[in-house]
Image (cartoon, rainbow, N blue to C red):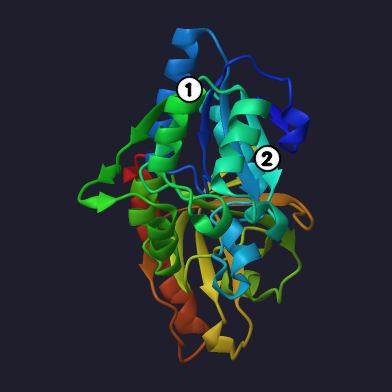
């Protein structure tokens, strides 16, 4: 997939592509429906399938106090878009100046003059331009004037839940990682690097990799069944997110006990895929009680891993 780092740099790059617009945080099941239609339409017209997305998230610029914790960093978002079959993604830097562009000018300058779109796919809740006054209706009306087709993708439901990035974020933040995985079509992943820890895990009989996460959104405090990717290999494991209450900790720590014997890990990248929450954090009377409970957690995690479809 070709990545173009601004709309201006995209000028002249395409000939009548099919375009969709959005933030695509998580690239969840709803996004996947849009992207599949985008690629199918582009293939049928023998043109490129193009995504226009934004970085940073618009809310972080317009209302920083309300900025969401993102499900994935930009690199993961681009990888997921590439995996969907998209030919190119234009990443437009979002700023207050960009936000102040009138909706009509946005359509004319960017969708028509720069991208030259012959068809645009939009979600039902699209808003853009100054004051977010641009709507699906604005795009449909402009399509009639400028000569591009418009397809509106209606809400996508999984079970009885309308899939939206904000809904997925709430599920992850609440620790419902199994529910989030159903909406994402894949487990929520936390990426980071292994860092030195307090070394208590080995003393309990369950050595852990302490993780310095770079993913913004972490599941709430608790113990989880996870799959991990480390050194290009996949392992099952148990991950703990919390303040180590048995030892009087005050900072949130992310640590994972992996079901394998591993060597030196410090500084290595690690990805944790969260499958299911096992329990909440709890303060135990002593290290022995904690060790016994971890043994139960390991047993339960192995059962979850064996039954997981992910």
Q: Quadrant of residue 108?
A: top right
Residue at image point 55% right, 28% down = 83
Q: Please give the label number shown on residue 193.
A: none
Looking at the rendered image, the disc whose residue lies closer to the viewer, 2 or 1, is 1
**Is any part of residue 230 visible from this angle?**
no
Which sits in the foreground, 28 or 228?
A: 28
Task: Give neighbour class at mark 2: few <14, some 14-19, many 20+ (Cα, 10 Å).
Answer: many
Task: Give neighbour class at mark 1: few <14, some 14-19, many 20+ (Cα, 10 Å).
Answer: some
Which sits in the foreground, 148 or 2?
A: 148
Q: Quadrant of residue 234?
A: top right
Whether 16 is drawn above or below 237: the answer is above
**What residue would you read off at disc 2?**
91
Q: Quadrant of the C terminus?
A: top left
* Image side of residue 50 versus residue 39, left or right: right
Percent position of residue 159, x then y: 21, 47
Dot 2 and dot 1 residues touching (CB under 8 Å): no
Q: Distance between the Cα atoms at labels 2 and 1?
A: 22 Å
Percent position of residue 271, x then y: 61, 50
Percent position of residue 267, x then y: 79, 56
Residue at image point 60% right, 27% down = 112
Which sits in the foreground, 175 or 109?
A: 109
Outermost residue toward the front in this view: 145
Whether 300 is drawn above or below 157: the answer is below
Outermost residue toward the left in this view: 160
Q: Which of pointers 2 and 1 lies earlier in the amino acid sequence? A: 2
Q: Please give the label number shown on residue 148.
A: 1
Q: Label 1: state its secondary structure.
A: loop
* Image side of residue 124 versus residue 243, left or right: left
**Is any part of residue 157 visible from this angle?**
yes
Residue at image point 60% right, 41% down = 106
């Amino acid at each position: 997939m070709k990545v173009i780092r601004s709309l201006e740099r995209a000028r002249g790059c395409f000939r009548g592509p099919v375009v969709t617009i959005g933030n695509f945080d998580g690239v969840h099941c709803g996004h996947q429906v849009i992207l599949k239609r985008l690629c199918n339409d582009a293939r049928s017209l023998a043109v490129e399938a193009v995504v226009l997305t934004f970085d940073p998230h618009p809310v972080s610029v317009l209302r920083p106090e309300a900025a969401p914790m993102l499900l994935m960093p930009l690199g993961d978002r681009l990888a997921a878009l590439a995996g969907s079959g998209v030919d190119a993604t234009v990443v437009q830097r979002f700023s207050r100046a960009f936000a102040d562009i009138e909706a009509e000018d946005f359509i004319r300058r960017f969708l028509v003059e720069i991208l030259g779109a012959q068809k645009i796919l939009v979600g039902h809740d699209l808003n853009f331009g100054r004051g977010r006054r641009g709507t699906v209706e604005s795009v449909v009306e402009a399509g009639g004037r400028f000569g591009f087709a418009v397809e509106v993708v209606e809400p996508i439901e999984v079970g009885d839940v309308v899939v939206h990035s904000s809904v997925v974020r709430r599920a992850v933040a609440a620790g419902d990682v199994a529910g989030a995985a159903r909406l994402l079509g894949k487990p929520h992943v936390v990426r980071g690097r292994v860092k030195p820890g307090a070394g208590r895990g080995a003393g309990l009989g369950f050595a852990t990799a302490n993780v310095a996460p770079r993913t913004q959104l972490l599941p709430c405090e608790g113990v989880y069944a996870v799959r991990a990717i480390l050194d290009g290999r996949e392992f099952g494991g148990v991950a703990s997110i919390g303040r180590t209450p048995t030892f009087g900790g005050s900072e949130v720590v992310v640590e994972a006990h992996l079901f394998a014997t591993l060597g030196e890990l410090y500084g290595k990248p690690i990805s944790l895929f969260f499958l299911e929450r096992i329990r909440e954090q709890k303060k135990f009377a002593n290290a022995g009680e904690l060790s016994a409970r971890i043994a139960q957690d390991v047993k339960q995690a192995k059962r979850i891993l064996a039954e997981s479809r992910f």
